[in-house]
Image (cartoon, grey):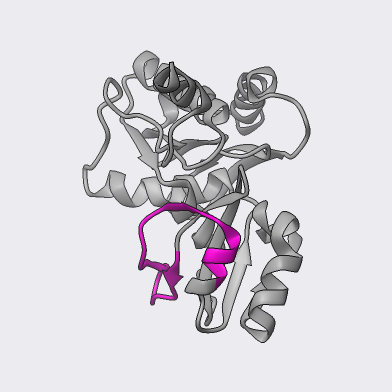
Amino acid sequence: MPVIAIETATMAGSVAIVDNTRVISEITLNIRATHSEKLMAAIDRLLGDSGLAIDDMDGVAVSIGPGSFTGLRIGLSAAKGLSYASGKPLMGIPTLDAMALNMTFSTYLICPIQDARKGEVYTALYRPGDKSPEKITDDIAVNPDNLAGMITEKTVFLGDGVNRYRELLMAKLGELYNEVPIPLQLPRASNIAMLALKRLEKGDADDPFTVVPRYIRKSEAEIRWKEK
């Protein structure tokens, strides 16, 4: 039951093909090039190198945020196009849920943090579970100082917010602060696919006409329009 997945919530975009037993192929690029420049080429290479076509997929999965507004729109547009063209079901997967999956075997509280700019991070808290992390808060945009105030036990942090706010969080949290190795910091399309497979097995999918990114907060354009 192969699924093709797209992750464009951060600068580190990735695409993957995963089935129930293995990661067939995955491409990650963490470079300063827009997803509109590299995404479709990466998908074409992914399929070509795997010897597969869209028609061989059982579903299309995509990261729906929170994250970069532009990145999420690009990824979701591409996923919708693949779903429309192939008739395959579409599954939108929360980005932070997929990031937390990097730490499935953690014994600490799990806290993915994405740099949301404006002095905030996108985050949620997860408790280690038997098979996958259990989400214990909603997705939020929060000041890192306030986030530190929410932490009362040993916690492992991951995501692009770590590099930006490491010193602040370490100073606030001391021995409660832990972070993952660099290879586990990034969101991964293969995790998006794994969570999508669980939904697909239950016959659960999204309507391509109505699924939208999970922005959490208003875009600059919406704020400026409201001010006018």
Residue 32: where, in percent of width, then height? 78, 31
Seen at 23% across and 42% down, the residue is 204
Q: Is residue 127 magenta?
A: yes
Quarter containing the N terminus? top left
Residue 42: where, in percent of width, then height? 66, 26
Quarter containing the C terminus? top left
| Marker count (numbered) | 0
Most extreme residue toward the front is: 228
Seen at 25% across and 27% down, the residue is 207
Specify whether 211 is left or right of 194: left
Please say whether residue 180 is visible from this viewpoint: no
Q: Residue 216: which quarter of the image?
A: top left
The relative height of residue 119 versus residue 212 in the rendered view (above or below) is below
Residue 126: where, in percent of width, then height? 43, 68
Seen at 52% across and 84% down, the residue is 153
Residue 107: where, in percent of width, then height? 52, 82
User: Where are the magenta residues, as a range?
Assistant: 125-148
Q: Nearer the viewer, residue 100 or 104?
A: 100
The relative height of residue 66 versus residue 218 in the rendered view (above or below) is below
Please say whether residue 223 is visible from this viewpoint: yes
Q: Residue 60: which quarter of the image?
A: top left
Most extreme residue toward the left is: 203
Q: Residue 62: which quarter of the image?
A: top left
Q: Is residue 215 magenta?
A: no
Q: Nearer the viewer, residue 116 or 34?
A: 116
Specify whether 189 is left or right of 166: left
Specify whether 45 is left or right of 125: right
Seen at 51% across and 76% down, the residue is 151
The relative height of residue 195 versus residue 28 in the rendered view (above or below) is below
